[in-house]
Image (tube, rainbow, N blue to C red):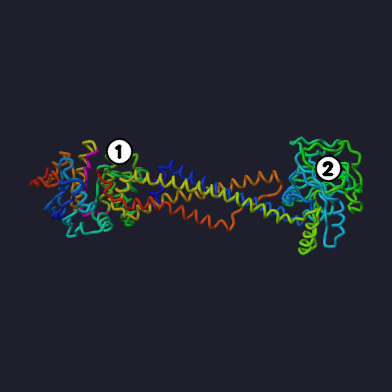
């Protein structure tokens, strides 16, 4: 019987290929949506894992997380610099690192931060050392710069009309091991350098910095010819004097209880907000989940359409072969054998399409994830999970149940059809 | 080996006043060679369908060695036909993509009765009908060769009766004559009853007993003392 099925499929190969391609594309669409959504969710969750607590000025919590964890360029409101001092003195805090954004080099964001963050969160330095002077920079694993390279600083981003900081340049002294976060795409410099580049200095009234526009592409509201920035100036990370205004502070609490206590405390203050990035992302996923349901519904609808179209083709095809099928019956083939041929032939095509479709979907999701990672710096894990078992079972069931319909039509067809009409 | 006995057989088609087939009594003894002829619409095909169990008559008995096909269910009739009837059809009904040998074996394989000796028999039969290349793809064969394959297929399970419906109608005269001779020789050698439907005068002339049908009934049934 298998021999007959394969001989038949070989003879009708163009039609068989079209059926397999149709099924494969429909299945690939659904698989890509599911895999890609999961990859985005897992990838961003894993990327945010390393960021325990983020303190910022009141405003959009989502934006605070997107800017600090995912380094998305956007204007963040600033909070008073003494918050950093308070956090550093807090016994519940292992360390607190300021972060400053706004500049970029060659599309890679320049992030000002402290040595504490580099020492304690990064997976280590794979090349060279971490920065020790104002003009030194450490690059993330995904930045194609080697120690010794020169980094010019641009306010904002080149493709949104950024403006060069003239006379400001950093020397790359080290490179971090991969962390699997968007920070792999960052060029990390001392925050003191960022302040000096932007004409801000510790000890200035923090409030004076409130007006500083961090928006990328916004016209820099300071004199680009800079006086404060010095390549070899030593770093002061004791924050003894009140630092300038800060968009965000990354905090490593000593315990989970401390984390909740700190978040509560800084949420209650009128001038700050504390968020767990993972929690904010959960809210985002809820919204993404709705989008996914819509996409999934479209994918399922497409699959139903393809199934209906294939059913139509199968029924017409079986009708066209009435005489041939009748002849087999007349020659002594039992009806269950004919039933098996029709069912088996279509099932083989549908299952082949389903398997190829899953492969295609996986491939498409992987390629999209790769492109995404190259752009955003953190990997998207494209993987099948236990949750897919239900869907896969349904797909398999449909592949073997749908062919029962044309097979049943053949079952009912009398062998007389083979004879001359 | 199989003898046929029809009694009071009547087949009616929806919308027609007169029965499509009405045969009070017809006996064909075992190993007989009979040709059925008559104009189109005379009931030849209906009679073939009835005696092969493809069509169940509205009334009457169709007995082969005492087994009444009219009393059997469809699957049982299918099984009986597979085991006892060798069918040769005008349109061959061979399946492209398979070789001659695979075509001969296909119905037996689908019925799961193709053992080792059946496979060997298929090759021997192909040789017997004059085909020396059992693995030749069927679509590369001439019409005459195709009908030979169909004849070999009909004989595979050593049927008690061979029923051929217009076996020469789509062949040229030379091939037609060869197929007619082949059928009669093979039937004689195997002892099978041979019933051929034909309007080919040369084929009809070769048969000792000729049954003519008209308007669904037997209009003539003559047996020559000596076959041509």
Q: Can residue B51 be seen from the camera position used here?
A: yes
Image spot of residue B224 (x, y percent): 8, 46
Q: Chain of mark 1?
A: B
Q: Read off the residue under disc 2.
A: A212
**Between B225 and A198, the one nearer to me in the picture:** A198
Mark 1: secondary structure: loop
Question: Is B159 part of what is drawn in magenta?
Answer: yes
Q: Residues within 10 Å of mark 1 (few under 14, many from 20)?
A: few
Identify the residue shown where x is 14% and y is 51%: B32
Q: Nearer the viewer, residue A247 or B204?
A: A247
Instruction: Specify the quadrant that holds the C terminus of chain B.
Output: top left
Does residue B142 sit above or below A404 in this rendering?
above
Which segment did they paint magenta?
Answer: B157-170
**Disc assigned to residue B112:** none
For residue B32, side relative to residue A235 (left or right): left
Residue at the spot of label 1: B142
The one nearer the camera, A99 or B197, is A99
């Amino acid at each position: 019987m298998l021999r007959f099925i394969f001989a038949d499929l070989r003879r009708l190969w163009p039609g068989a290929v079209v059926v397999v391609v149709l099924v494969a594309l429909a299945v690939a669409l659904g698989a890509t949506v599911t895999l890609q959504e999961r990859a985005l969710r897992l990838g961003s969750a894993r990327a945010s894992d390393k960021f325990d607590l983020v303190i910022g000025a009141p405003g959009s919590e989502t934006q605070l997380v997107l800017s600090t964890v995912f380094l998305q360029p956007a204007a963040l409101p600033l909070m008073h610099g003494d918050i950093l001092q308070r956090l550093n003195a807090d016994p519940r805090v292992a360390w607190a690192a300021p972060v400053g954004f706004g500049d970029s080099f060659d599309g890679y964001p320049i992030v000002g931060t402290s040595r504490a963050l580099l020492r304690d969160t990064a997976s280590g330095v794979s090349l060279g050392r971490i920065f020790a002077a104002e003009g030194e920079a450490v690059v993330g694993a995904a930045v194609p710069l080697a120690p010794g390279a020169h980094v010019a600083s641009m306010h904002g981003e080149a493709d949104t009309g950024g403006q060069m900081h003239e006379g400001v340049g950093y020397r790359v002294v080290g490179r971090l091991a991969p962390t699997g976060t968007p920070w792999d795409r960052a060029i990390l410099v001392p925050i003191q350098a960022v302040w000096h580049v932007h004409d801000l200095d510790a000890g200035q009234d923090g409030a004076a910095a409130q007006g500083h526009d961090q928006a990328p592409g916004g016209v820099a509201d300071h004199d680009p010819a800079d006086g404060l920035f010095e390549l070899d100036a030593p770093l002061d990370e004791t924050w003894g004097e009140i630092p300038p205004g800060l968009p965000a502070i990354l905090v490593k609490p000593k315990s989970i209880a401390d984390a909740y206590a700190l978040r509560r405390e800084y949420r209650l203050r009128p001038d700050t907000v504390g968020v767990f990035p993972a929690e904010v992302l959960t809210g985002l996923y809820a919204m993404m989940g709705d989008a996914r349901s819509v996409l999934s519904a479209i994918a399922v609808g497409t699959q139903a359409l393809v199934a209906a179209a294939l059913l139509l083709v199968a029924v017409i095809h079986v009708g066209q072969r009435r005489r041939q099928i009748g002849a087999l019956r007349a020659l002594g083939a039992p009806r269950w054998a004919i039933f098996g041929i029709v069912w088996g032939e279509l099932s083989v095509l549908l299952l082949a399409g389903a398997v190829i479709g899953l492969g295609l979907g996986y491939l498409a999701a992987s390629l999209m994830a790769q492109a995404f990672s190259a752009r955003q710096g953190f990997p998207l894990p494209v993987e099948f999970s236990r949750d897919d078992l239900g869907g896969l079972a349904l797909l398999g069931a449909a592949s073997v149940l749908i062919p029962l319909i044309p097979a049943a039509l053949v079952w009912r067809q009398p062998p007389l059809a083979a004879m001359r009409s | 080996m199989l003898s046929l006995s029809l009694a009071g057989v009547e087949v009616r088609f929806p919308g027609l006043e007169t029965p499509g087939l009405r045969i009070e009594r017809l006996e064909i003894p075992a190993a007989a060679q009979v040709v059925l002829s008559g104009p189109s619409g005379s009931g030849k095909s209906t009679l073939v369908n009835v005696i092969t169990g493809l069509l169940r008559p509205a009334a009457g008995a169709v007995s082969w060695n005492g087994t009444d096909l009219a009393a059997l269910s469809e699957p049982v009739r299918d099984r009986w036909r597979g085991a006892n009837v060798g069918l040769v059809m005008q349109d061959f009904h061979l399946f492209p993509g398979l070789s001659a040998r695979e075509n001969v074996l296909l119905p037996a394989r689908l019925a799961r009765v193709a053992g080792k000796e059946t496979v060997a028999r298929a090759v021997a039969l192909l040789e017997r009908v004059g085909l020396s290349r059992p693995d030749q793809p069927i679509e590369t064969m001439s019409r005459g060769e195709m009908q030979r394959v169909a004849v070999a297929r009909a004989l595979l399970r050593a049927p008690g009766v061979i029923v051929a419906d217009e076996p020469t109608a789509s062949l040229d005269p030379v091939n037609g004559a060869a197929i007619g001779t082949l059928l009669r020789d093979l039937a004689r050698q195997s002892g099978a009853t041979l019933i051929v439907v034909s309007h080919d005068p040369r084929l009809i002339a070769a048969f000792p007993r000729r049954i003519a049908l008209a308007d669904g009934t037997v209009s003539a049934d003559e047996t020559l003392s000596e076959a041509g």
